[in-house]
Amino acid sequence: MMKRPLLVMALLVIGVTAYGLIGWPGEKIEPEIPAPPFIPTPKPLELWEPLETFVGESMDVTIGIVGKGCRDCLLTVKGRDGIVISSCTFVNSKIVVEDSSDFEFSLCRLDDYYVHEDAALQIHGSSGVLLDRCEVVNNSVGVAIGNCSDVEIMDCLFEGNDQHNAVTGLDCRGARIHGNLFRFNFPHALMITNWEGDPLDQLDIYGNVFDRNIEDAINFEEFRGQAEATLVRGNLFNGTSWAGVNVEYNSWNANIVIEGNYIDRNGLLVEDILEDGRPTSVYPAHSHQPEPYSAGWGHGIMLEDCCGVTVARNVIVSNVESGIDVKNARDIVVENNTIALNRVGVYVAGYQESSLIRDFSPLALVDSGFSEVTKARNSVFLNVEEDWLVEEGSTVSSTD
């Protein structure tokens, strides 16, 4: 006589358990949003008082330099192998490295070089370049790297380089950028180009923190024709005004994989981001800037006038505008992402007519059209207006 009540109770327990896992029939249970990962940032650099300080010198560097100070100096490393500059301070000074190999710049502070469109550290035509545990702060342009190979930038602080990027160029045949903190740089933390379409250019950008950079944290411009994939993986982006990652300006066959990043709170204003429970300035202007910066698009990822980009396994949440914004982009794969709490989850549209007449890298009419996106196994939910907003003419096909 007791078997039926026990059976009914067992069925109720099974039903309640199933509801907790999948909900009642027809009810949609939203997945949880993962918490941001912890990515360690470089410790503040501690340097001893310089053993010797040079003021207003122009020096051709032929041997390594350790423990020196330079103010208002110009250092040139040209056609040299194995030069090491370490544990030095540079104030309003410029370093030029050309046609050299195995150059190391480590445990150095490089600041307050504010010359219009000029980099404090300029490296060109060199191989085996290492930047390790440096601070590059408050310069017009931090570092410019062009036509190089085997480049590594690790465990550095780039802050307040606010006239034209923290690191620019990066048309490198092999570059690894990892363990760095990029903060308050304008317009970009990294601006990456490949104007000549070198198929051997390739970068691996991983394990960095991009905190409140002014426009795009990473901006690919005319980055095209890569034979091997460039990777943007396992980074943390937050508080960027325009987009965490932006691929634009005729970046055809870019072969970029944006994977496993956490991208959140882009485009937010002062009161929305706190440090130690108190409001902090999201975009603090450097003393050289006459006015504070203003917010921009506020996208997680922006893909415009490009093709050949995969966006996979990212968490893209709480951005003011689109989680992923796609305009005139083809061969775009969006898979296994969590996209939530943005204004629009994924926005897919055609080209903008203004792109045909812009001053820099105008779009050719033959390259203008609608966007084509392939999606698979994404969790797109709780976005304010639409999860997927696809304008007429553009297409999103599913392989789910």
Image (cartoon, rainbow, N blue to C red):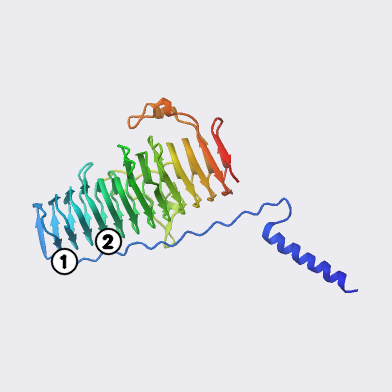
Q: Nearer the viewer, residue 330 or 120?
A: 330
State left or right for residue 144 relative to residue 80.
right
Q: Is residue 164 shown to the viewer in this render?
A: yes
Q: Nearer the viewer, residue 158 or 348?
A: 348
Label number found at residue 49: 1
State left or right for residue 132 relative to residue 5.
left
Residue pictured at 16% horizontal, 66% vertical: 49
- Residue 101 location (% of width, % of height): 20, 53
- Residue 95 location (% of width, % of height): 17, 51
Q: Nearer the viewer, residue 174 or 62?
A: 174
Residue pictured at 32% horizontal, 38% vertical: 197
State left or right for residue 152 relative to residue 97.
right
Q: Secondary structure at mark 2?
A: loop
Residue pictured at 53% horizontal, 48% vertical: 335
- Residue 63 location (% of width, % of height): 11, 58
Label number found at residue 371: none
Q: Where is mark 2, residue-wise?
A: 133
* Amino acid residing under circle 1: Glu
Which corner quadrant of the image does residue 398 belong to?
top right
- Residue 61 location (% of width, % of height): 11, 54
Q: Residues within 10 Å of mark 1 (few under 14, many from 20)?
A: few
